[in-house]
Image: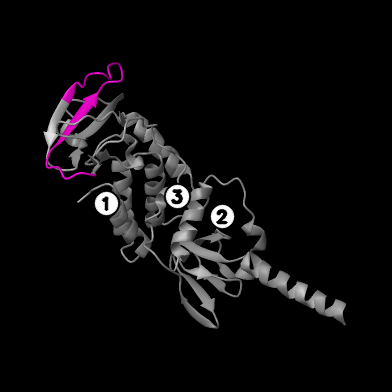
Amino acid sequence: MMKKLTFLILFATAAVYASAQNDYLLYSFKGNVTVVENNVESKAKAGKPLNTAATLKVAAGGTVTLICNEAAMFTIAKAGTYPMSKFGDSCKVTNSSVSANYVKYVWAQMTKSSGSPGSNRKAYMNTVGAVSRGEINNVWVDTRLDTVNYAGGDFPLSWKSYAEAKEFDFFLYKPENIAEPFYSTTVTKLKIGIPTLSARIKPGNSYYWIAAIKGEENEDRKVLNYVSKETYAAVLDNIKKQSAGFEAPAEEAYRIAFMLEDAHYLAEAHDYYTKAATLDSTNVLYRSTLMSFRKDYEIK
């Protein structure tokens, strides 16, 4: 009797574990796609969590992409009725072209029950900025801005000040002469727009910049890469191709924005976050991320 009881407990535990390991998130869709849960049918919605008891109905011309177990992504492009319990094999993680970090990020943001969605993007990004070296001073630059790749658009280089100050010195350096700035100016805000520097910087070149309280020194240099239009176009084209399945325009724009931010193309990432939030104004994640991005980078 004890052996039988132990077997039943293990079987039940395994069943619960298997079920927990096959949960889904409706990532993107087009056309007429509905979800049936507890005998109630409703329209599909991006970001909707689904368990193995749910059923998807895809009409002719419809397509739906799902995320399974936080990391696997797959697309259903054929009309039919699909019990979610039948997709266990699709939940195996493969060498998908989509960044695994991005898929995990979307899952975490769309299933989180508290906090501001989209505010912890950095925790899921791979790239790091330039190594900054310098003594402790009264000006601090977020590590997100250690390296900025810029191809165009309106975007500020910003900083924080630990001391009350009304004026700040901004310096630009060329890599071949980091001892003397080739341009300097004084500003009253904790940022300077890159377009205001456009007459002094040229595409295809890299620069260092420093911000300091007026009259004080700061050796903590950051990198500004003024990327050519051709280089950016190649980067963007590569990112656009990195999709493991169907994406509606809003989902595609949001993924592109995330990957551009990860690659330090911040002005361009802002454009795509804005596009995603505009294309799907009801999506809380897209709207919240755009607001978080603007706060992170001092965009008004």
Viewer-nearest residue: 77 or 27: 27
Q: Residue type at mark 1: give it.
A: Arg
Viewer-nearest residue: 17 or 91: 17
Q: Which residue is drawn at 43% across and 41% down?
A: 239
Q: Residue type at mark 2: give it.
A: Ala
Q: Mark 1 points at which residue?
A: 294
Q: Which mark is residue 194?
A: none
Q: Name the residue under label 2.
A: 71
Q: Give the range drawn in magenta.
A: 162-183
For the residues labelled 2 and 1, say whether their Cβ atoms are less than 8 Å apart. no
Q: What whole-number distance in Å separates the C-alpha atoms at marks 1 and 3?
A: 18 Å
Q: Which of marks 1 and 3 is in front?
A: 3
Callout 2: helix, strand or loop?
A: loop
Q: Which of marks 2 and 3 is in front?
A: 3
Residue density around tag 3, few if under 14, some if 14–19, many if 20 or more, within 10 Å: few
Callout 3: helix, strand or loop?
A: helix
* Up/down of 278 relative to 45, above or below: above
Q: What whole-number distance in Å separates the C-alpha atoms at marks 2 and 3?
A: 16 Å
Viewer-nearest residue: 218 or 49: 218
Residue 73: x and y in percent read 55, 55
Q: Name the residue under label 3.
A: 123
Q: Which of marks 2 and 1 is in front?
A: 1
Task: Locate residue 220: give its quadrant.
Answer: top left
N-terminal-most mark, 2 or 1 = 2
Is residue 182 on the magenta stretch?
yes
Task: Locate residue 86: give its quadrant.
Answer: bottom right
N-terminal-most mark, 2 or 3 = 2
For the residues labelled 1 and 3, say whether their Cβ atoms are less than 8 Å apart. no
Look at the image and tell me whether residue 255 can be seen. Answer: no
For the residues labelled 2 and 3, say whether their Cβ atoms are less than 8 Å apart. no
Callout 1: helix, strand or loop?
A: helix
Look at the image and tell me whether residue 54 can be seen. Answer: yes
